Image: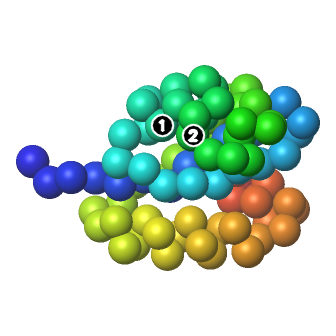
Amino acid sequence: MDKKYYVYILLTERNTYYCGYTDDIEKRYKAHCEGHGAKYTKANKPIKLLWTKEFDSKSDAMKEEHRIKKLNRKQKDNLIFQ
């Protein structure tokens, strides 16, 4: 079985978004909730996983994460709630 990678967007308790990539969504989300996932989510606790997208390569996932991080809030809303 080929390894899959995921880009995800979390909603934080401060009503902000956090975008990242991983090869294990459940493990990564749990790490964020426990304050170990990233500096940003340590200070801004995640409350919900809003969006995910699957990729066949780490490179493609990283490119999509980078693209999403450049979007403004309205553009991220459109992506999440389309």
State the residue position of label 1: 28
Tally of marks: 2
| Along the viewing direction, whichever of 53 and 11 lies nearer the viewer | 11
- Above or below, 45 relative to 1: above
- The x, y position of residue 3, in whole percent, is 21, 52
Secondary structure of the residue carrying numbered label 2:
loop
* Residue at the spot 9% in from the left edge and 48% down from the top edge: 1
> Quick check: 51 left or right of 79?
left
CA gap between label 1 and label 2 equals 7 Å
Q: Residue furthest left?
A: 1
> Quick check: 23 left or right of 13?
left
- Residue 54 picture quarter: bottom left
- Above or below, 28 relative to 16: above
State the residue position of label 2: 37
The residue type indicated by label 1 comes to Arg
- The x, y position of residue 80, in whole percent, is 69, 51
How busy is the neighbourhood of tag 1: few (under 14 within 10 Å), some, or many (20 plus)?
A: some
The residue type indicated by label 2 comes to Gly
Is residue 51 among the parts visible in the rendering? no
> Quick check: 66 left or right of 58?
right
| Along the viewing direction, whichever of 44 and 5 lies nearer the viewer | 44
- The x, y position of residue 72, in whole percent, is 84, 68
- Above or below, 15 relative to 34: below
- Above or below, 24 relative to 78: above
